[in-house]
């Protein structure tokens, strides 16, 4: 079974530039998550989708970050314009469906973003 | 507010020695608790999880964890550490039925030969 795919793996940009990350979840997984992991910290949820609807985006800095999952499969996370403090690893995860219980989240390898 | 505390930022143990990584959580209801491991340049891999039932849970790679409600703890243990266990370990609590996770800051494990 293929895992969660993310691209690019690494990205270096100047502040105020824009950047986009792509995630393809495990086939059949209804729920997709984007996490931000700043160096020395644990991952922090940015946004959660169930199919193509947003479940939770309370911690997404909406003035600069946006995300979409148009067909309920792959997803794109965008930052525009980037700030120095956006330097982090961006992790994508997917799960079957929380439903009435709890399903394991499977994580991709992440995209390491450096903002200069 | 829900939170997870991992008091130890960095731990060094000798290969073959036992290991215990501490995790304390704050959560209003019965928590879903997880331990993940992250090797350099890799994503997070689930080691074990606790939802309900037996408070001692077994995971992959010889790890186990014990849920202690009275202490709000979910410590990770391994009786004999291998050099390949060197990595960063994250404790997390699942937030209700939504499914998203709240992570601790992680504990970096180094293994001495």
Image (cartoon, coloured by chain):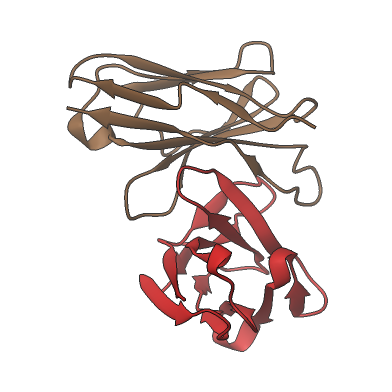
Residue drawn 66% across the image and 19% down it: A52
Q: Residue furthest front?
A: B113
Q: Is residue A101 left or right of residue B84?
A: right
Residue drawn 55% across the image and 82% down it: B19
Residue drawn 40% across the image and 76% down it: B11
Find residue B64 and report its image quarter. bottom right
Q: For this rendering, which residue is in front, B7 or B81?
A: B81
Q: Is residue B104 left or right of residue B62?
A: left
Q: Quadrant of the C terminus of chain A?
A: top left
Find residue A51 and report its image quarter. top right
Colour given to chain B in the rendered image: red
- Residue A6 visible in this rendered orientation of the protein: yes
- Residue B8 visible in this rendered orientation of the protein: no
What percent of the width, then of the height, locates residue A30? 74, 29
Q: For this rendering, which residue is in front, B112 or B18?
A: B112
What percent of the width, then of the height, locates residue A32? 63, 31
Q: For this rendering, which residue is in front, A17 or A53?
A: A17
What percent of the width, then of the height, locates residue A19? 34, 16
Residue A73 in the image: above or below residue A116:
above
Residue drawn 29% across the image and 16% down it: A80
Q: Is residue B11 left or right of residue B68?
A: left
Q: Count the marks.
A: 0
Q: Quadrant of the N terminus of chain A?
A: top right
Colour given to chain A in the rendered image: brown
What percent of the width, then of the height, locates residue B20? 54, 82
Q: For this rendering, which residue is in front, B2 or B19?
A: B19
Residue B113 in the image: above or below residue B59:
below
């Amino acid at each position: 079974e293929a895992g969660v795919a993310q691209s690019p793996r690494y990205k270096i940009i100047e502040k105020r530039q824009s950047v986009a990350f792509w995630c393809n979840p495990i086939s059949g997984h209804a729920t997709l998550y984007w996490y931000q992991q700043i160096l020395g910290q644990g991952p922090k949820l940015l946004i959660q989708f169930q199919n193509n609807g947003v479940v939770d985006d309370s911690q997404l800095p909406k003035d600069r970050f946006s995300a979409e999952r148009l067909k309920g499969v792959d997803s794109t996370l965008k930052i525009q314009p980037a700030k120095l403090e956006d330097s982090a690893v961006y992790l994508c995860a997917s799960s079957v469906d929380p439903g009435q219980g709890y399903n394991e989240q499977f994580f991709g390898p992440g995209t390491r973003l450096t903002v200069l | 507010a829900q939170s997870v505390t991992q008091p130890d930022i960095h731990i060094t143990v000798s290969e073959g020695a036992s290991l215990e990584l501490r995790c304390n959580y704050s959560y209003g209801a019965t928590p879903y608790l997880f331990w993940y491991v992250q090797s350099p340049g890799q994503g997070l891999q689930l080691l074990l999880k606790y939802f309900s039932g037996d408070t001692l849970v077994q995971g992959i790679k010889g790890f186990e964890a014990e849920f202690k409600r009275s202490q709000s703890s979910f410590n990770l243990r391994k009786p004999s550490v291998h050099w390949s266990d060197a990595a960063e370990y994250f404790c997390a609590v699942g937030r209700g039925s939504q499914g998203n996770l709240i992570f601790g800051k992680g504990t970096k494990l180094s293994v001495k030969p």
